[in-house]
């Protein structure tokens, strides 16, 4: 049965989508069957995986709000072994439309159940909020991967996120584990980045991934070409480090077994 990993942090611009797309692509490149689920109405993971949003009749909205079978919206991406459930701007209404519905927090979990066997990994890209969409992701997930940008206020807001994780563990998903904290956009030229790493490691200890994502121009460029970094520039530092991260994620699964 596939492992479901939610990529979450309510702060915008910390590297959630970049991580969701590139971790998915690297896991697929290593021979795993992977599904990338985009639940951010901005749909950046969808376009980052090379899917043309304008061509979509249906998306994750129809699954969450209208009970459409997830299998019906799984589409291929530009990467072999990697499929995606896309998000379009239609999803923007879901956060409000779900409020009065039955079992609103478990809709994504229920939708993914019939297709979990099909994949080795299901990666969910969350929106920058702790609303119902993120709660759905945390409820559906086996673990949460938290990208943290190497900047001055890195720790700010994390206690709120961890509090939400604890609430989900208590009421909706006892199994939910912390996959790890991923340091992103690290700039080796500044002392600040190094201080942030020390601070995060003191707080999260062995939960911090050894792979640290550097600030890398090619990683920033790849989405506008609709390609994950391993396609856009496989020799770049960004491609190397996201491949290392994928291996750490695979090792985590093997350690548990
Ligand atoms: P989030 O999904 O958390 O809002 P994104 O992954 O979209 O964050 O990243 C925010 C912006 O920073 C995007 O334009 C993205 O291309 C860029 N970016 C993300 N990670 C890196 C990196 N390691 N190096 C350079 N640019 C990056
Ligand atoms: Mg994003």
Image: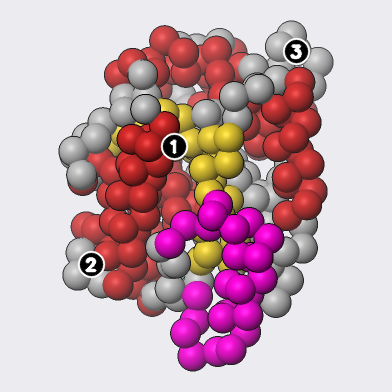
- Most foreground residue, 223 or 213: 213
Nearer the observer: mark 2 or 1; the answer is: 1
**Residue 240 rendering spot, x and y as whole percentages:** 27, 65
Work out how far the residue at label 3 is from the one at label 1, CA to CA, in angstroms: 25 Å
Image spot of residue 67 (x, y percent): 56, 11
- Is 245 part of what is drawn in magenta? no
Q: Residues within 10 Å of mark 3 (few under 14, many from 20)?
A: few
Cα distance between the residues tagged 3 and 2: 44 Å
Categorize mark 2 by other alpha carbons within 10 Å: few (<14), some (14-19), many (20+).
Answer: some
Q: Which mark is residue 233?
A: 2
Q: Earlier in the sequence, mark 3 or mark 1?
A: 3
Secondary structure found at label 2:
loop
Instruction: Specify the quadrant of the image occupied by residue 205.
Output: bottom right
Q: Is residue 147 visible?
A: no
> Magenta region: which residues?
186-210
Residue at image coords 20%, 64%: 234
In this view of the protein, which residue sits in the foreground, 208 or 90? Answer: 208
Q: Nearer the viewer, mark 3 or mark 2?
A: 2
- Which dot marks residue 123? 1
């Amino acid at each position: 049965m596939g492992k479901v990993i939610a990529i979450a942090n309510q702060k915008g611009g910390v590297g959630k989508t970049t991580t969701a797309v590139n971790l998915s692509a690297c896991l697929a490149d290593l021979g795993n069957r992977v599904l990338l689920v985009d639940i951010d109405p901005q749909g950046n993971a969808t376009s980052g995986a090379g899917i043309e949003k304008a061509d979509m009749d249906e998306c994750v909205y129809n699954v969450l709000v209208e009970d459409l079978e997830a299998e019906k919206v799984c589409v291929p991406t530009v990467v072999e072994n990697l499929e995606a459930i896309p998000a379009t701007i239609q999803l923007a209404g879901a956060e409000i439309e779900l409020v009065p519905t039955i079992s609103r927090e478990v809709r994504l979990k229920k939708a993914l159940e019939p297709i979990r066997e099909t994949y080795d990994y299901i990666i969910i890209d969350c929106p920058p909020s702790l609303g119902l969409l993120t709660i759905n992701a945390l409820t559906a997930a086996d673990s949460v991967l938290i990208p943290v940008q190497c900047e001055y206020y890195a720790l700010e807001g994390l206690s709120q996120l961890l509090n939400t994780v604890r609430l989900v563990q208590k009421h909706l998903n006892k199994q939910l584990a912390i996959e790890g904290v991923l340091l992103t956009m690290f700039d080796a030229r500044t002392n600040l980045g190094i201080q942030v790493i020390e601070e995060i490691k003191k707080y999260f200890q062995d939960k911090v991934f050894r792979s640290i994502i550097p600030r890398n121009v090619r990683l920033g460029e790849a989405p506008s070409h609709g390609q994950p970094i391993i396609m856009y520039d496989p020799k770049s530092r960004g491609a190397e480090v996201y491949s290392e991260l994928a291996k750490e994620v695979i090792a985590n699964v093997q350690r548990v077994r």
